[in-house]
Structures are given as structure tokens and as C-alpha cells.
Amino acid sequence: MSFRDAVDNFYERLVMDAIDATREPGDTADYLTDVMCVALNRLPPRYYRHTIDMMFYLADEELSVMKEKSLAAVRFARDFVREHQRE
């Protein structure tokens, strides 16, 4: 594994979970990809090297807040992408 592949942003996983939780029948892969980009741009990066480190050192309350922020960012992003879709 390259050092370039050794770091991830924890919010990516949380945003994907929030997208899955808010999925609608007409959602396309392109639309959801745009939603993910917009949502992630509204959140601070939270980088980690090993998943176990994040799960072990992250307090339950902090994780809950991060999940709420991710869901709010996805809801905003869904509206934003819908309003700014190219025809």
C-alpha cells in the first residue's frame, strides 16, 4: 500500500451512510455523487489512518454530532444539487 492510500476522511463514510438513509427512488448515481461532493465540501475533514483508531478514540457524543452534521449536509446538498442541475 502506498502512503497515498493510507489516509482517509472519516466524514466520507458518514456522508455515504447519510445518503443511504435518505435515498429516494429516482436518485441516480450521478446525482448522488454530486450530493456527496457538495455535502463533503460543507464539512471539515477528519482524517485518520486506521479505522480502529477513530472508533476507539472517538467519544460516542462526538460521533453522534458528526452523524448529525453529515445528515444535515446531505439534506442541504440534495436541495442544492436539485436546484442547480444542468438541463
Image (spheres, grey):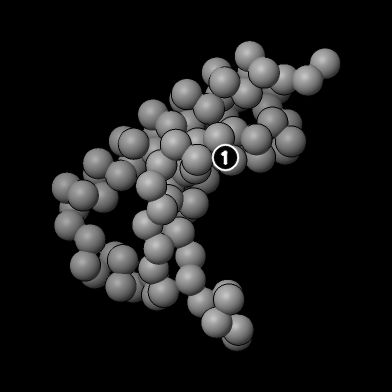
Return the residue found at the far right: 87
Relative to residue 76, is residue 35 depicted above or below?
below
Return the residue found at the far bottom: 1
x 44%, y 36%: residue: 42
Q: As rendered, which of 19 and 9 lies closer to the eye? A: 9
For the C terminus, the quadrant is: top right
For the N terminus, the quadrant is: bottom right
Quarter-wise, where is residue 69 in the image? top left
Local secondary structure at mark 1: helix
Taking the image as drawn, is residue 11 in sight? yes
x 41%, y 42%: residue: 43
Relative to residue 78, is residue 47 depicted above or below?
below
Q: Whole-percent x and y of residue 81?
A: 62, 23
Q: Whole-percent x and y of residue 57?
A: 21, 67
Mark 1 lies on residue: 36
Hey, what amino acid is under mark 1? Met
Q: Left or right: 51 with respect to 31? A: left
x 21%, y 49%: residue: 62
Quarter-wise, where is residue 10 in the image? bottom left
Taking the image as drawn, is residue 25 in sight? no
Q: Whole-percent x and y of residue 41?
A: 50, 40
Q: As rendered, which of 80 and 66 lies closer to the eye? A: 80
Q: Whole-percent x and y of residue 65?
A: 25, 41
x 33%, y 42%: residue: 67
Q: Left or right: 17 with respect to 34? A: left
Relative to residue 7, is residue 13 depicted above or below?
above
Q: Residues within 10 Å of mark 1 (few under 14, many from 20)?
A: many
Q: Left or right: 3 with respect to 84? A: left
Numbered disc total: 1
